[in-house]
Amino acid sequence: MKPITDIDDPRYVKALAHPLRIRILAMLADRVASPVQLAAHLDATLGTVAYHVRTLHSLGLVELVDTRQRRGATEHYYRAREHPRFPDDAWSGLAPVAKQRMLSAILQQVGQYVTSSAAAGGFDHADAHMTRMSLRLDDRGFRQLAAASRKWLREAERIEEAAAERLERGTDSDGDACVDAGLVVMVFEGRSGDPRSDTDRTREPDAVSGGVGA
């Protein structure tokens, strides 16, 4: 099946048509899991989850990686394929309903991920970091902030690639163990919904970044 490289691909649009499929995709991007395991975390019936996993599989967004015998039945384990990347103008062109569904599912997933990582000591690492900033910017400043965030994400990918090479060769000069790190970067207009005068208004938009060693 031809890989999905464009978010305008009808298969990707169809995947975003149901909020549960977005949540399943987010979970399978972090781990290999079976519909039974997914259903336990999604507050949904096994039949419903299995149906949506099959749909994602038929769309080429998840792949079957293992099967195991469990209580006389065959349990199937899946993981997400690499998702298509968003070009700079793709998010603004996404339909409002699909955009809201993605936001809702992703924010819920981020919250669960950070909370569970923190409970397991994910912020105990000496270099763990979390910052929330409110910045008052003009349009040019907002564009510059967005560009800076994309640059940082590209740098994070480069750091991961270099670390993967060291781990594969076993030549980590620091002798550190592998760390499953989490990184969340968001740039958005900070709107509380409360009417405020310009003098009372906090600095906007918000720029939130967090690093989690989970």
Image: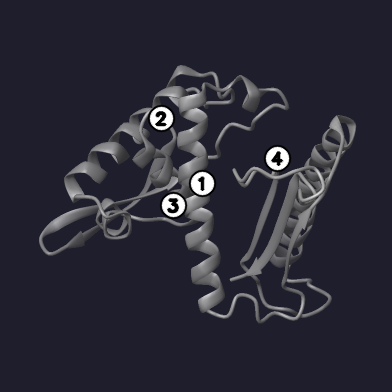
Residue 26 placement, left or right of 174: left
CB contact under 8 Å: marks 1 and 4:
no
Does residue 122 appear anywhere in the picture? yes
| First-in-chain label (2 vs 4) | 2
Q: Disc 1 or 3, which lies upstream in sequence?
A: 3
Local packing at callout 4 (Cα closer than 10 Å; few below 14, some 14-19, many 20+) is some
Tag of residue 27: 3
**Residue 160, position as x, y percentages in the image:** 73, 56
* Few, some or many residues within 10 Å of mark 1 (<14, 14–19, 20+): some
Which amino acid, by three-letter code, is at mark 2? Answer: Ala
Q: Which residue is mark 2?
A: 15
Of callouts 1 and 4, which one flags the residue occurring earlier in the amino acid sequence?
Answer: 1
Pick whichever of labels 3 and 4 is earlier in the sequence.
Answer: 3
Residue 182 lies left or right of residue 145; in this view the side is: left
Q: Is residue 134 left or right of residue 97?
A: right
Q: What is the C-alpha distance between the residues marked 2 and 3?
A: 14 Å
Q: CA distance from mark 2 to mark 4?
A: 27 Å
Sort mark 3 into few (<14), some (14-19) or many (20+) by Cα contacts within 10 Å.
many
Amino acid at the residue labelled 4: Glu
Of the numbered discs in the image, which one, if any, rests on residue 106?
A: 1
What's the residue type where badge 1 is placed? Ile
Kindly report the distance in space between the C-alpha atoms of the residues bearing marks 1 and 3.
Answer: 10 Å
